[in-house]
Image: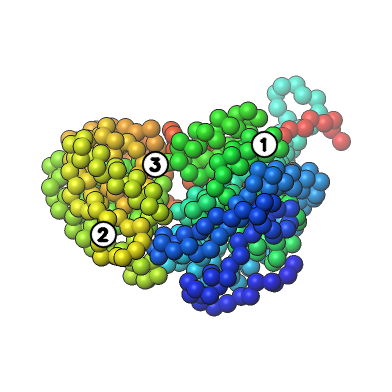
Amino acid sequence: MSSAIPATGAVPATGFLAAYDAPLLIDGRLRQASDGGVFDNVDPFTERVLGTAAEATSADAREAVAAARRAADTTSWADDHGFRARCLRQLHEAMDRHREELRAMVVSEVGCPISMTRGLQLDQPLADIPAMAELAERYTYERALPRGTSGAAGERLLLRRPQGVVVAITPYNYPIQNLLIKLVPALAAGNTVVAKPSPLTPWCATFIGRLVAEETDIPAGVVNILTGTSVEMSEQLVADPDVDMIAFTGSTAVGRSIMASAAGTVKKTVMELGGKSPHLILPDADVPAAVRWGLLALFRHAGQGCSKLTRVLLPRSRYEEGLQAAAATAAEVAWGDPWDERNIMGPLIGPAARDRALSYTEKAVAEGARILTGGRIPQRMPHGYFLEPTIVCDVGPRDTIAQEEIFGPVAAVLPYDDVEDGVRIANDTVFGLSGGVWGGSVDEALAVARRIRSGTMTVNGSYWYGNDTPFGGVKQSGLGRELGVIGFEEFLDYRVIGHPAS
């Protein structure tokens, strides 16, 4: 274990980032792509190239998987629970030493407001690592099963063993959090990992890979980091017969493609996919408070979150009151420079994401809805991939904007007739990731929340997220769960051994 990276205090966007080298990590070595290829990493706020990242080749992917397979099959990583826990604590300590470099990196390559790094973008997932290290040590990996009534003459032993080689594919919106909630439990459970971050945000993962290689005792091949834009390289990782499991966060469309590729070798898949989550505001609710809470949460990070409450369901009897509150809320959103602690909304990740969001507002108008606020590229900023906080109202339940995920600062407002109608509309999508209910009576709101098919729900703004909360979706919002003991156990398999009584 070495300390080649100097720890620092607060790090500005220049300096450290300008000199950053973003290598691959393959079989314990930090290196460039086998053919020397690189691609640009662009700051979505300045629109300038921060630097480059290695463009991993198919040969690099094969080498990474082979290294992970070898480490899984020939080392004691899977069985030495105490060593794994120690290595994870080393990773936590290393990331803590370099917290400010990571903070500068995530703001620069993601464009998220720096205030978000005090929570889910950095500090919260970093603080959660020790709990997973402790679980690696204290979990019961073997236990005797009680004698059953099947007539078995001997004893039975239930084993929980790691899946083996895990490929973790992560998105751009929360690059550190999404990597850690796959990498850390996978390692804690005894797996080896090949991680592939989004090519839109490659540096956070490569920096963590550098820490793994230089500041921990994690053996060569246990963690491998590949960056690149090649679809073929990603498809190869998914289809490789030496890979046992895929952990993926991203769109439902890509998730379907991964499942199809993984089916060839019957790999396990855990997927956190898209969402079109409803915020059902009941007739007796404090409508202005409910609307304001939901929309401020939606516009935070420019709507780039899969569990955002992007459909606002208002009772017809209070529809105009709700629209007034929505317009007022959009006007108070603080947006702009992500380095300004006062802002809650930065730019979208790139021009394609901004154009996609704009296309949905245009289609909504063509289908009969109207734009209440926003819907334009703001002129007051000379750079940055910004879109105004946008609210589209008079939306029908089957309109495109009510059915498809946008991943931008766009809210769709739908009227409903009564609570039964509201529940029907809330459930009327292929998605089921998250949702919210707000009512004057908590008991009634909770009863309504139970009727909405989704993996997570909030009632009257109560926050459900935590490192012990199993997170994931139903319907086409995903398979399996992340976080907590349940998320840890996704990376373990069941085995049973029958043996004579000793």
Q: Secondary structure at mark 1?
A: loop
Q: Is residue 238 visible?
A: yes
Q: Which residue is mark 2?
A: 378
Q: Position of residue 350 (x, y in %)?
A: 40, 54
Mark before the other along the chain sequence, 2 or 3: 3
**Residue at (74%, 44%) from the top-left corner?**
66
Q: Secondary structure at mark 3?
A: loop
Q: Are marks 2 and 1 in contact (CB under 8 Å)?
A: no
Residue type for callout 2: Pro
Q: Secondary structure at mark 2?
A: loop
Q: Position of residue 282 (x, y in %)?
A: 23, 44
Residue type for callout 3: Gly
**Residue at (74%, 53%) from the top-left corner?**
27
Residue 240: image tag: 1
Residue 275: image tag: 3
Q: 54 or 280, which lies in front? A: 54
Q: Position of residue 253 (x, y in %)?
A: 45, 36
Tell me which corner region of the image, top left, top right, bottom left or bottom right, holds residue 498. Answer: top right
